[in-house]
Amino acid sequence: MKTTHCFVFTLLMLATSAFANVTVSTPNNGAAVGSPVNYVATATTTTCSKGVASMGLYVDNQLVYVVNGASLNTDWPFNPGSYNTVVEEWDYCGGATYTAVAITVSSQTGVVVSSPSSGSQVSAPVSYMATATTATCAKGVASMGIYVNNKLTYVVNGASLNTQLSLSAGTYNTTVEEWDYCGGAAYSNLNITVTNSEPKLSNLQANQGWNSWGQLPPDYADCSPCSGLTWSTDYGIKSPSKSGDATQFNTSGTTPYGVVLWYNPVIGQFSTQGLPDNNHTLIPSLHNFIYDTDFYVTNAAVTQVLEFDVAMYMDGIGMFWGTECNHLGGGEWDVLNNVTQEWAKTSASCGLANGWNHLTLQFQRESNNNLVYQSITLNGVTANINETYAPFTVPPSWYGITVNYQMDGNYKQSANTTYLDNLSLTYW
């Protein structure tokens, strides 16, 4: 099921990048890592209107890996030792830029954590980067995870881990563990002290400043009311609820595949959180967002799509991190291409079951205002997305950040009810 958000796409244009570069998010320059080494990078160019054609990895001046497009994510095997590596981009006009990354590959098997250091003082959100190897299982490492005070809080498939955890100020016993395909495991313990927490808006589901409208096929123009589509919102739900203060979202009707979008303006214009940012100093400083919520499905058989978004508008530029669980369509997570208004499939599966689910989305705004979909964590299992898209243009008067939730109807527009609880937005 594919829908568009007509209210934000009236003036679509490709925003011009401020500069050309290769941004390597992992590994860090000078890092000590284990093999295989996870390389994650994105590229932009302002000198070629056709964009970035491909990216590649050099190891000691030898090209060892090439991928088409403006993003790279691969695990490359290394023998123990020190290496000079380079991640390079080539554009369609014959230009190129690169970033050099020097690394030292440890001979240690097990879990090698490059960040954070045990005993260190860190700021929230806490960046965890680690790799794992096994000498006892020929099939290799299956997955890795992070325990915080003996509670498993993050899991990712594969032999590398790169994520950020939103932890409040305090002292923590954390463990990074790997599990191999043969039933074995290894771990590394890290004691850390978090000195400060990033700003966080909590219990947003309980705030009664939510607005809503519907959209109907085939053009999905905004409507309220809408022919053959009804919806309602009920606050202060005690059961089902995690906190005792959940919010209920209801849709029904007779027009197939109708959708309802709820949005809450949290920062900037019409802020429901007391953050109008009248001097326009807060929003331009923000580059990272974590959307975290519990959501309850009452009838997975009629739940076509559930969508969770963060939108940001400033200086005539719009950024809409649209993320949908395409449950009855392809059964995968999709992300929104802001320029084409089309949903792009990811490799992350999304199958919903009745009951409570926990979702964490990590987004980033690059220095040139490109949008990065970093990761999706559903019920403790993380999929690293690392997809980058350009922003779009909006009226200059638009200024703010909204948190959104959307329910898409099925082929019968069956009556459906879902709940949100513990909805928060962390930003920095």
Image (cartoon, rainbow, N blue to C red):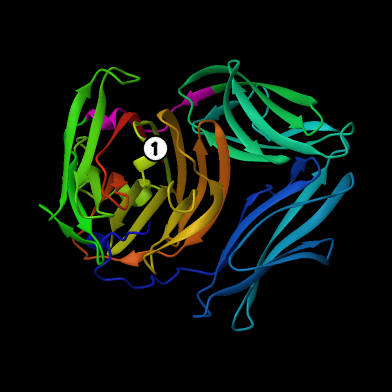
Residue 375 position in % (x across, y down): 52, 45
> Is residue 285 visible in the rendered structure shown here?
yes
Residue designated by label 1:
300
Q: Quadrant of residue 133?
A: top right
Residue shown at 81% from the left, 43% from the top: 35
Q: Is residue 223 above or below residue 414?
A: below
Give amino acid for label 1: Ala
Viewer-closest of 268 and 240: 240
Q: Nearer the viewer, residue 71 or 59?
A: 71
Q: Which residues are magenta?
A: 194-206
Task: Please check the rendered image and state whether residue 204 is part of the magenta-colored stretch, yes or no.
Answer: yes
**Can you tell which quarter of the image residue 22 is in?**
bottom right
Q: Secondary structure at mark 1?
A: helix
Residue at the image position 26 percent from the left and 55 percent from the top: 256
Query: In the image shown, does 382 or 274 lie closer to the viewer?
Result: 382
- Rendered location of residue 77, percent (x, y): 83, 50
Whether residue 339 appears in magenta in the rendering, the answer is no
Left or right? Give the position of 234 relative to 380.
Answer: left
Residue 121: image location, x then y, percent: 58, 25
Question: Residue at (62%, 57%) from the top-left corner?
Answer: 41
- Residue 153 in percent (x, y) is at 55, 26
The picture quadrant where one finds residue 162 is top right
Left or right: 101, with 362 as reference point: right
